[in-house]
Amino acid sequence: MIPLLSVIVPFHNVEPYLAECLKSLAVQTLDDLEIVLVDDGSADGSRRVAADFAAADPRFVLVGQRNQGPGPARNAGVRRARGTYLAFADADDVVPPEAYERLVAKLAETGSDLACGAVGRLVDGVLEESTLHEKVFRRPELCTHITDKPVLVRDRTVWNKVYRRDFWERAGLQFPAGIYEDVPVAMQAHVLATSVDMLGEVVYHWRRREEGENSITQRRNELPNLNERLTAIRAVRAFLDERAPELLDGFDALVLEKDVLFLFQALEASEEPEPLLDLARAWLAELGPRALAGAPSLRRLELHLMARGLVAELREVRDFRRSRAATGTRVVPRGWRNPGWYGDYPFFRDRRLRVPDEVFDAREELKLVARVDAGEWAGTEYRLRGQVAIHRVDRRVGRVDLWLSDGRRKVPLEVRRSGRHGVSAVIDPARLAGGGPVWRLQARTETRGLVLKGWFRDGEAGGTWRFTVPPWSRTGMDIPQ
C-alpha cells in the first residue's frame, strides 16, 4: 500500500546520533509512513545502525550510494519515496512525536502545498529557541504565502516542513550539490507554493553537535564553506529576482543579520585574512544597496571596516559589540542647529579613519519607551504615573505631550514631570463624554530635534494600556491583556 508520508533521512558518519533520530521517527503518532534512509557513503557504524532499524521495522527502507553530499542523497530518497506527502529529517536531529501528524492534518484540512512549523535548538540536551527561525512562527496562519507573510523569508530550512508530493514534482524541486543545498529549495518551495500553512508548535529539534565528525554548521567559518554559502545566496537571489523581486530586500537583510556573522568570525580568527576579504567583498557586491543602507548602524560599521580590509579595527568593534550584549549600545546627539543621532561606537570620535557619519547614523533605530506604572482613582478623577524614555539614549527627554485617543478623538492631558523619566497626568472622564468606551494613551516627545511618538504600555503586563470610561466598566478601570 502507498504510505501517507515518506520521510527522507540522508546520513553520513553520524553514528553517535542516528539511533536517537530514528527512534523519534519510529514513535511518530502518524504511523502511516515510510522512512527512507539514504546512506551517503558512511565510513563509520551508521549503516549498521540504519540496517538494524530496517530489519526490525518494515516502515524503514535502507538505500545507499557513494558519498555525494546531502543534496544528491535527498534526491535519491525522493526518487525512492512512495508517499503522498514528503518530509526531510537530518540524521543528527530529533522529530517530536506529534510533528508529522499535525503537519499532515493541516494540509489535509486546507489543501495547501506545504506546511511548516517552529523549530527548537537542541543544545547539550536542552531545547532552546532556534535563532535562525525566531519571529517566524509567533503568529500561526493557514493558507498564506511568503509574499503575504514576508517573515517566511527567514524560514530557510527544508526539515521543519511537510510537502505534497504532487506539488514537489509539479514545481520541479530538486536539491543542488553543495553543503547549503536546502536554502535554495526552501525558498523556491515557499514562492512556488499556491498556499502555505504555518503552525506555532515546535515540529523539529535541530541539534548542535557535541561530539563525532564535525557538522557543516561547525565548519561554517572555513573558507570553502563560506564560498558554498555565497553560492547558495546567489542562487536564491537569482531565483527571487526572477519570480519574487519584492522579497529581495528582506532576504538581503537576513543575510546581513545572520550569514555575514560567519565572515566576521572567520576574519577574527584568521592570520591570513586576504582570501577572506576578497570573498567578503564578493558577498557585499551581491547584496542590494537598500539592504546595506538599511542595516543597523553597528552592523554598517562592521561592514564598512570589512569592505576596507581593516581587520584589526573590525575585531575591536566585534569585541565592543560582545561587551555591550547585556547593557546595549548608546546613541548620542551631535551638532546644534540640525543635530544628528549617532551610535557611540569605536572610531565615532576618531577622525583618522575617516568613517563617514552616515555609517554611525542611528536616528531610525531610536524608539520611544512609554509605560504606565501605577494609577488610582481620586474622587471622580483618575491619576496615573509612568515613565517616558528613548531606548538607547541616556539623557532626559525634552518636551513631552500626552493625549488620550479612542481612534477618532484626541483629548490632550496636562503633563507633570518628575525626575529623569517620570511623568504623571490626571484623567477627567467627563472630558471623554461622547467618545468611545476605551481610550489609549499616547506620547509625543521632542529632544534635540528628534521627534518620536508611541503608545503607553502597561508597566506590569506589557500590553497596550487602556482606560475604560465609567459606566462601561464595572470597576471604572480596565487594563485588558
Image (cartoon, grey):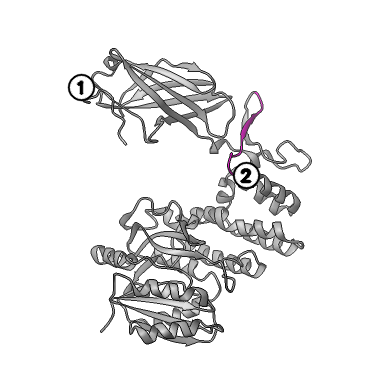
Task: Work out whether residue 294 or residue 481 is closer to the camera in this orientation and state it.
Answer: 481
Percent from the top left, x then y, of residue 107?
Answer: 28, 65
Residue 298, which numbered label? Answer: 2
Q: Could you say which quadrant of the image residue 80 lies in?
A: bottom left
Q: Is residue 364 above or below residue 208?
A: above
The amino acid type of the residue labelled 2 equals: Leu
Mark 1 lies on residue = 471
- Tags 2 and 1 touching, CB below 8 Å: no
Using a 10 Å C-alpha cutoff, classify the residue at mark 1 as few (fewer than 14 neighbours), some (14 to 19) or many (20 or more): few
- The overriding secondary structure of the stretch rendered in magenta is loop
Percent from the top left, x then y, of residue 378?
Answer: 32, 14
Q: Is residue 458 magenta?
A: no
Residue furthest top in the image: 379
Residue plotted at (58% across, 39% down): 328
Residue plotted at (55% across, 56% down): 258
Residue furthest right in the image: 352
Percent from the top left, x then y, of residue 13?
Answer: 54, 79
Q: Is residue 444 above or below residue 304?
A: above
Percent from the top left, x then y, of residue 34?
Answer: 34, 79
Q: Tell me the magenta residue range.
A: 323-336
Q: Secondary structure at mark 1?
A: loop
Q: Is residue 324 magenta?
A: yes
Q: Is residue 389 above or below residue 242?
A: above
Q: Secondary structure at mark 2?
A: helix
Q: Quadrant of the C terminus?
A: top left
